[in-house]
Amino acid sequence: MVLYSRYDSQKQDIRTLGVGNAGASNTVTVFGWKMGVVVAILDILKAIISILVIRYLFKNSDIFSLYLNGTSVILGHNYPFFMKFRGGKGTASTIGMLFGINYKLGILGVLVILSITLLTDFIALGTISLVLFFCICNYLSWVWKCLFTFSYFYCYSKYI
């Protein structure tokens, strides 16, 4: 998605500006909210489409394969080989993975990162809170099989 931010009206390479990464948060810092939102949406769609393709190709895919796919998208975003392994932070790709696995988690993840970022005015704190939210949801899902997480559906859909 760095390609879009690279060819804006100012003709500047995002990787040479700001903190030097190619993600949406650096795009917000350098070019403003409008360009940052466009880059974030494209990064989110990248992860969603990838997970939907896996669900379509492998009808009986388990949650592990969806996680593996989402992790691969995040790693590919963070360390792209065609950009000398210097990519973004993977926040938008993580949100896209959450949306791809379960849209409820995606909505909650967006609310978490937006609320923390708007309250503190630090995108990094919003990102940390998103990762913490993701870890807590997985822990609760594993221990209690909560209704708001994806594993409840996957664990019990076989018996319904």
Image: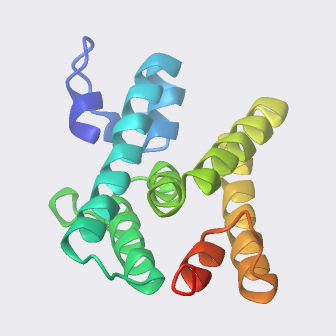
On screen, residue 118 versus residue 130, left or right, reads: right
**Is residue 102 among the parts visible in the rendering?**
yes
Q: Nearer the viewer, residue 86 or 1?
A: 1
Vertical arrangement, residue 91 with respect to residue 110, above or below: below
Question: Residue 71 is drawn in which quadrant?
Answer: bottom left
The x, y position of residue 79, in whole percent, is 32, 66
Question: Is residue 22 in sight in this rendering?
Answer: no
Q: Quadrant of residue 140?
A: bottom right
68 or 74: nearer the viewer: 68
Query: Which residue reaches farthest front?
Result: 160
Say which residue appears at 75% left-offset and 56% top-offset.
129
Judged left or right of residue 31, residue 108 is right
Work out which quarter of the rendered image holds the C terminus and state it. Answer: bottom right
- Seen at 40% across and 65% down, the residue is 74
Q: Is residue 135 above or below residue 16?
A: below
- How many numbered badges does the structure rendering display? 0
Q: Position of residue 77 (x, y in %)?
A: 34, 59
In the image, 139: left or right of 24? right
Name the quadrant of the N terminus: top left
* Image quadrant assignment for residue 105: bottom right
Residue 70 % position (x, y): 40, 69
